[in-house]
Image (spheres, rainbow, N blue to C red):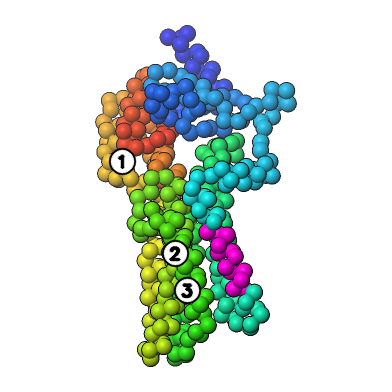
Amino acid sequence: MEARDSPRSSMNGDFGFGTGSDRRFAFSRQTSFQQQQQPHTPIAVDSGRPFLSRTDSSIDIPNPVHRYDKLTGSTERSSFPSFVFGVFRNIRSGHRYMKRLFLMISLNVAYSTVELLFGLFTGRVGLVSDAFHLTFGCGLLTFSLFVMAASRNKPDREYTYGYKRLEVLSAFTNALFLLFMSFSLAVEALHAFIQDESEHKHYLIVSAVTNLIVNLIGVWFFRNYARINLAYRNAEDMNNHSVCLHVLADSIRSAGLILASWLLSIGVQNAEVLCLGLVAAAVFTIVLPLFRATGGVLLQMASPSIPKTALSKCLRQITAQEDVLEVSQARFWELVPGHVVGSLSIQVKKGIDDRPILEFVHGLYHDLGVQDLTVQTDHT
């Protein structure tokens, strides 16, 4: 027993796990055909020292996620220009949704430029204002396109989980912009009601029809995501859904402007107030579920795909083990949709072999849908 305990104590000291009573191991569950590949969750380490990872059958040292220069003793890190060039390469060789989004952005930029120039030459303030609104929307869509390309980059030393969460951030930004747009439309409707404005600017009809046609092309491009409540399988679904809702909300806004102009032409009073109010309510309704979903991921809330009762049941099963004294600091969250991460601390009896307990805990949460689990065992 002494011969076996000595290497263990040495490894604990080398890897910074503390003395014998403090042991932390990270688990990453993989299927059999992935055992020789990189671990599912890359882990950055300092000073080139390997990180100790335990599996069901052996102790493995995963391959580093970054290249290490033995001559200089430094880790190779990609520069910002190379990162940007890599993003543009990804856009050029990207999937169909990236190419469709690039085409849609090009159409919107061309249309908003023509509208801005026409508004400046004719002195139409409404056209200039609408052109700036479209330009700001194009900026958000461009950010979504950039994120689609950047999220394909591999994990590195600084971003050990990769760049997938950028897509969640992009979706949250789009949702926040659309909520602000619905609020501004509601304020505009209230202002029109207070001022009793019944005269509509008919020269905006041509602009609204053209804008509606351009946005309907975008809705057709992302028609697979044209739903209010969508089950997100990954971060890419969330970002694509936000792009679809963005162009759909602009389409609803243009359709409301056309409807208001038609109602005013037939003598309906306060038609602009009614249409603006309906558009504001519609945009708020379709965007709120996306805002809540993206905000939950960014705030690291518990995954909605795993019921709270199931997590509580797992904790009771672990506590019921004979050698387990206490389970604490159980935390589970979504890194991105479809990727659940968790950590917990277990106090066990002193002097026992904790490997069966770790394997039991690991298998229990893997069956529940937790991809990456870190378990700390304390011997007391």
Q: Which residue is mark 2?
A: 216
Horizontally, residue 124 falls left or right of residue 221, namely: right
Disc 3 marks a residue whose amino acid type is: Val
Image quadrant occupied by the C terminus: top left
Report helix, strand or loop for mark 2. Answer: helix
Q: Is residue 168 left or right of residue 146?
A: left
Three-letter code, disc 2 = Leu
Above-or-below relation of 199 to 89: below
Residue holding disc 1: 311
How far apart in space, not on screen, are marks 1 and 2 (Cα)? 44 Å
Q: Which mark is residue 251?
A: none
The label nearer to you, 3 versus 1, is 3
Tag 1: Cα neighbours inside 10 Å, few (<14), some, or many (≥20)? some
Magenta residue span: 104-116
Circle 3 sits on which residue? 209
Tag 2: Cα neighbours inside 10 Å, few (<14), some, or many (≥20)? some
Mark closer to the chain start, 1 or 2: 2
Residue 98, image x and y in percent? 52, 50
Question: Residue at position x 36%, y 29% from top?
Answer: 362
Residue 77 to residue 278: above or below: above
Q: Position of residue 214 (x, y in %)?
A: 49, 65
Q: Residue at x 34, y 21 (%)?
A: 356
